[in-house]
Amino acid sequence: MATLFTKIINGEIPCHKILEDDNYLAFLDIRPINPGHTLVIPKIEMDYIFDLNDDVLSGAFVFAKKVAGMIRPVVSCQRIGIMVAGLEVPHAHIHLVPIHQVSDLNFAKAKDTPADELAAMAAKITGA
């Protein structure tokens, strides 16, 4: 059965896309910790990030670096934090979270965000 993220890749579920290429997709988290919180996923379906082959794994982090460079000038933050928890959806993914301090990387702070606010943030990031 396809994961939620595979359904997003296939266009079956909408997302607020930030960047996409043949191998990876970045889109806004619908329950962001902070505005601009973005998920980076490989387009191959693999549950555990360290089960990805080395090329896909390293490529995901290079792609994430590019996405972080898009986010940082648009949102107020000291840096873009990175987290790989991998328990929320059984599809390898990297969280890119704008942060001011280490304690900002706390999923207890995540909140539902209206689609119009996510769309506005995606437009700011992709337009920069």
Image (cartoon, helix red, strand yellow):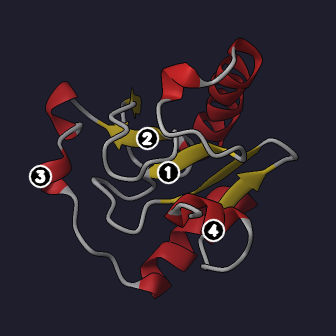
**Mark 2 sits on what residue?**
95
Mark nearer the N terminus (1 vs 3): 1
Mark nearer the N terminus (3 vs 2): 2
Say if mark 3 contacts mark 4, CB within 8 Å: no
Mark 4 to mark 2 CA distance (whole Å): 16 Å
Say if mark 4 contacts mark 2, CB within 8 Å: no
- Residue depth check, mark 3 versus mark 4: number of the one nearer the observer: 4
Q: Quadrant of residue 8?
A: bottom right
**Mark 4 sits on what residue?**
8
Mark 1 to mark 3 CA distance (whole Å): 16 Å
Coordinates of residue 106 in the picture (x, y in percent): 17, 42
Q: Quadrant of the C terminus?
A: bottom right
**Mark 1 sits on what residue?**
38
Coordinates of residue 78 in the picture (x, y in percent): 36, 31
Say if mark 1 contacts mark 3, CB within 8 Å: no
Coordinates of residue 51 in the picture (x, y in percent): 55, 22
**Mark 3 sits on what residue?**
108
Mark nearer the N terminus (4 vs 2): 4
At a point 26% along the width and 34% down the height, the residue shown is 100
Does 97 appear above or below 50?
below
- Number of residue marks: 4
- Residue depth check, mark 4 versus mark 1: number of the one nearer the observer: 4
Looking at this view, is 94 or 34 the one in front? 94
